[in-house]
Image (cartoon, helix red, strand yellow):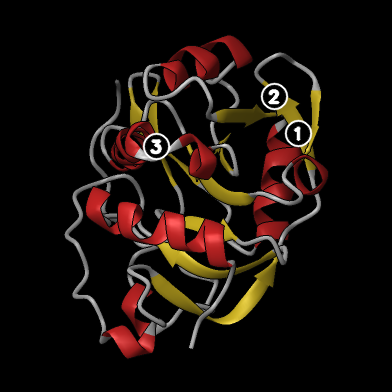
């Protein structure tokens, strides 16, 4: 992987509870936020969104180079959406590795009802083949999406996350600052909760089966 750790904060959503403030970070070192009281999150380990976000309606290209209608293809599934890139030195591979480890341990009746979708914010380097190979390193069930830069920017805007920003590192190298959390859409097609950088495997293992079996049962 290339690039250097980044720590600049991307702002612009304003939709997360205080537990998530400051976690719209570029790829870079991160610490796990202090968990809020269980009653504040309905017992979930992620951070509640102050206002639930509708599942966005966008179409990109999957790693088989076929159109992928995000809303249609994920309807009826617990859907985990993350915007990142394969050259990310830390946050992206850590999120994917943690999710993959937990997915391997969960029973099939849970995992078959979950879709993990990774949208690259770096289509220049993340071709469908590159994206597929990178995701297969974690879990071949993970869905990778790419497209034109304009289409990816529009998908981020539709999702309500800050649009990723390319940062020139010199010598032809660059890093990409992007939102550092995973949005989780329950089967009501709303995101009620997000999982920031620093979330642990034990947190995913605690929340995913409950979200699959019960849907959204917050406060």
Viewer-side label of 3, 1: 3
User: Residue 162, can we see it?
Assistant: no
Q: Position of residue 66 (x, y in %)?
A: 80, 19
- Label 2 sits on residue: 62
Label 2, label 1: how far apart the Cα atoms are: 7 Å
76 horizontally vs 18: left or right: right
Residue situated in front as seen by the camera: 188 or 49: 188
Q: How many marks?
A: 3
- Label 3 sits on residue: 103
User: Which comes before the other along the chain, label 3 or label 2?
Assistant: 2
At label 2, counting other C-alpha atoms closer than 10 Å, the crowd grade (few under 14, some 14-19, many 20 or more) is many
Q: Where is residue 204 in the image (x, y as percent from the top left)?
A: 34, 53
Q: In this view, does 186 lie above or below 97?
A: below
Name which residue lies at 36% across and 50% down: 26
Label 3, label 1: how far apart the Cα atoms are: 25 Å
On-image quarter of the N terminus: top left
Q: Tag on residue 60?
A: 1
Name which residue lies at 45% across and 49% down: 178
Q: Position of residue 164 (x, y in %)?
A: 53, 48
- Say what secondary structure mark 2 lies in: strand
Q: In this view, does 84 lie above or below 8?
A: above
- Say what secondary structure mark 3 lies in: helix
């Amino acid at each position: 992987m290339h690039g250097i750790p980044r720590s600049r904060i991307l702002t612009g959503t304003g939709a997360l509870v205080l537990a998530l403030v400051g976690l719209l970070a570029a790829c870079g070192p991160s610490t796990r936020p202090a968990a809020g009281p269980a009653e504040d999150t309905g017992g979930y380990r992620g951070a509640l969104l102050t206002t639930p976000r509708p599942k966005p309606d966008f179409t990109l290209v999957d790693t088989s180079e076929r159109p992928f209608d995000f809303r249609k293809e994920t309807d009826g599934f617990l859907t985990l959406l993350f915007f990142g890139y394969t050259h990310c030195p830390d946050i992206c591979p850590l999120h994917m590795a943690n999710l993959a480890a937990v997915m391997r341990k969960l029973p099939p009746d849970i995992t078959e009802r979950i879709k993990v979708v990774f949208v690259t914010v770096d289509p220049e380097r993340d071709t469908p083949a590159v994206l597929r190979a990178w995701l297969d390193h974690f879990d071949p069930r993970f869905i990778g999406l790419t497209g034109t830069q304009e289409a990816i920017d529009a998908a981020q805007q539709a999702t309500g996350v800050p649009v990723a920003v390319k940062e020139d590192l010199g010598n032809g190298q660059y890093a990409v600052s992007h939102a550092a959390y995973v949005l989780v859409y329950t089967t009501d097609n709303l995101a009620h909760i997000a999982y920031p950088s620093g979330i642990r495997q034990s947190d995913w293992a605690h929340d995913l089966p409950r979200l699959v079996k019960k849907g959204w049962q917050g406060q």
